[in-house]
Amino acid sequence: MTELILQALYSGLLQGGSYALIALGLALVFGTMKVINLAHGELVLLAAYVAYAVESGLGFGPVVAIPIALVVVCIAAVSVYFVVSRIKKDREINSLILTYGIGVILTNVILLVWHADVRSTSSTWLQEAFVVGPLYSMRSELLFFGVSIVLMGALWWWLARSWYGRAVRAVSSNRDAAKLMGIDPGRTELVSFIVAGILAAFAGVALFSYGVIQPAYGGALTVKAFIITVLAGIGSIPGVLLGAVLLGIAEALTVTLASSALQELAGMTLFLLVLFVMPNGLFGAARRRG
Amino acid sequence: MKTTFKRIGLAALVSAALIGSAAAEEIKVGAELPLTGSLARVGAGMQEGIMVAAEVFNKTHGGKHTIKIVTIDDESAPAKAIAAVEKLASEGVVAITGGYGSNNISPASDAANKLGLVYITSGGVDDSLVNAGRKNFFRINNSAGYEKAMVGLLGDVGAKSVSIVYSTKDATSGLAKDVEKALTAKGVKVAMHSFDPAITDFKPIINKIKIQDKSEVIAMVGYENDYVGILRAARVLKPSVKAMVGVWSLATPKMAADFPDLMPNVFGTALLPFPAEFKTADGKAFSDTYKALYKKEPDYLGQFGYVQSMLLFEAIARAADKGTLKKGGVAEEMRKTDRDTLIGRVQFGANGDNPNFIHRMGQHQDKKIVIVWPKENATGKLAYPALPW
């Protein structure tokens, strides 16, 4: 039993890293603009399909596709920003409807271009087992777990130390006050969308490397990212990592100790339990007003 | 002179119209399919078969009856499937072919039944579909046919213990439980592992099989994305099993081409070997037309879609000849169906099910698919024990 639990904890940790990478972009945009980008999962999926196109068309592995995915997804993210930024009234609710529509369009574009077939990397190296004692994983899972941690560290540093990072936090905290301090909120929000695009590009390539992709998968990714964002507490990067890892471990332990049919239920129960005890999420502070 | 030309022109137009109407009666048939959403891949595969059937039928019966397919995407959603059936009825279709996923087919065929339209499918194997008392519902395959094939193969290889990993969807859980029942009755030790369709990491399940079950065979009842996840997890954990066995969507040329490292020696249900060999005239007509229309090798989804649609078109033609097309004649003619098809003999029982359906088992061997069960249909030697890793 110990062996099973150890493997479940390890699998949950790696799965949590991948969830965190998917959720980070959504959390960032949600934190800065109060916009729930319901097309975020489709942006992640777009990156995954770019990786597939590079692998199947040019014969290069998914890692080589990262620069191309970055360009494509950032262009898509900027386009989403320009559409969302046109909303002048009730941005929170209108952006929800608008980004949902963009998500549907993106799904159908992916379906038209790459068809409905199941896709995944054919790189044998990425799928090979990496074994440490009783713990098993694919190389790709471990590689992108590392990438996820590095990106989260970089994002934390960027938000804490860089001028734009501070501007993002200022706009997130109080848009009008930030404007009075000489910060251009529009440009800051654009930057946060571009950073979210970068994170989505890495998440998509990671997804293609260890998982399976299909055009209809985007919605499920957005839901997972949204759960983690709320679980973490708005605007908290460590919260995203902790929330994602908690979710991953809860799911893996449910599979091991009970049944995998209950996996999603366990995740949602954890989500509701945390919100019941800590309504602002794991790391979220009560928002100041004014 | 001008008047003469006008008269000739008018006469030509009238005669062309008369010849046209006498030559072929155009009959509309609805195709309700998931072309987007989670079932888009299988829906598109079935649609190819339907279009091939229409093409072949119109070539052979075109002088008398012409089938026109009206397609509506049900977006893989039950509510949209009902709306699609109602829209097709309003457009004047005489019957519906298509449907994928038992949870979509059930409400869609209910709607068709209420509208008095025949509904035929090969996309739903859940037993509840034929036990609901729908008079106009027909299907050419069923859970029992898949169960017989899987249990038959496991019996032939002498498996003593089997771990069944299955999706919690209606059709997959129904089939998994039927297989469990049949294997247990034969004295085989069975361990069941259900999984949520949203699951992506199968390592915790495979680890349970490796450490706790220690079964000889892992039987997978799911869909393409599930198989890839299960096989990858098994490749990483390497449980000491003797074979990996699945059902639909696994022993296909597409899986062999897309996942060459995961497929070697894996078993799955298969109607035909790959490269496909079509020996009958019907098979050759299907294969040639399919290749001409889609520029690729036909697959099992196309075959099922072709068979269900061809049987429907033939019944429609017979009803049209008897003048009962709009008087319930299609359902009546469907019940009289008894013919050999690409999936074997098809007849319909009182509940609309095909009691003759029995699948075959194929095995991925050297990027080919070899039929290994039943022995009388085998095209090659069964490899056992044999694993993809």
Image: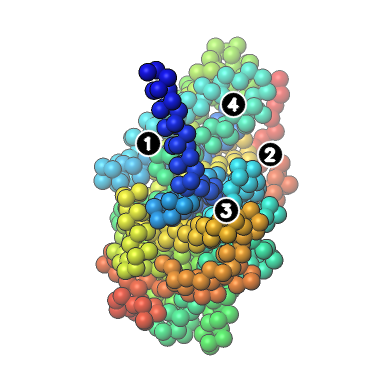
Secondary structure found at label 1? helix
* Residue B345, horizontal then vertical, whole percent: 47, 73
Secondary structure found at label 3? strand
Position of residue B7 in the picture relative to residue A57 (left or right): right
Q: Residue at x 42, y 19 (%)?
A: B3
Residue holding disc 1: A69
Residue B388 visible in the snapshot:
no
> Alpha-carbon neighbours of circle 1 within 10 Å: few (<14), some, or many (≥20)?
many
Real-space CA distance between mark 2 and mark 1, rounded to the nearest whole angstrom = 34 Å
Q: Earlier in the sequence, mark 2 or mark 1?
A: 1
Q: Earlier in the sequence, mark 2 or mark 4?
A: 4
Q: Are marks 2 and 3 in contact (CB under 8 Å)?
A: no
In the image, which disc is placed on residue A33?
4
Question: Does B77 sit above or below residue B351?
Answer: above
Secondary structure found at label 2? loop
**Res B196 quadrant in image:** bottom right
Residue holding disc 2: A280
Q: For the residue marked with disc 3, what is the amino acid?
A: Ile
Secondary structure found at label 4? helix
Closer to us: mark 2 or mark 3? 3
Real-space CA distance between mark 4 and mark 3, rounded to the nearest whole angstrom = 48 Å
Q: For the residue marked with disc 2, what is the amino acid?
A: Asn
Closer to us: mark 1 or mark 3? 3
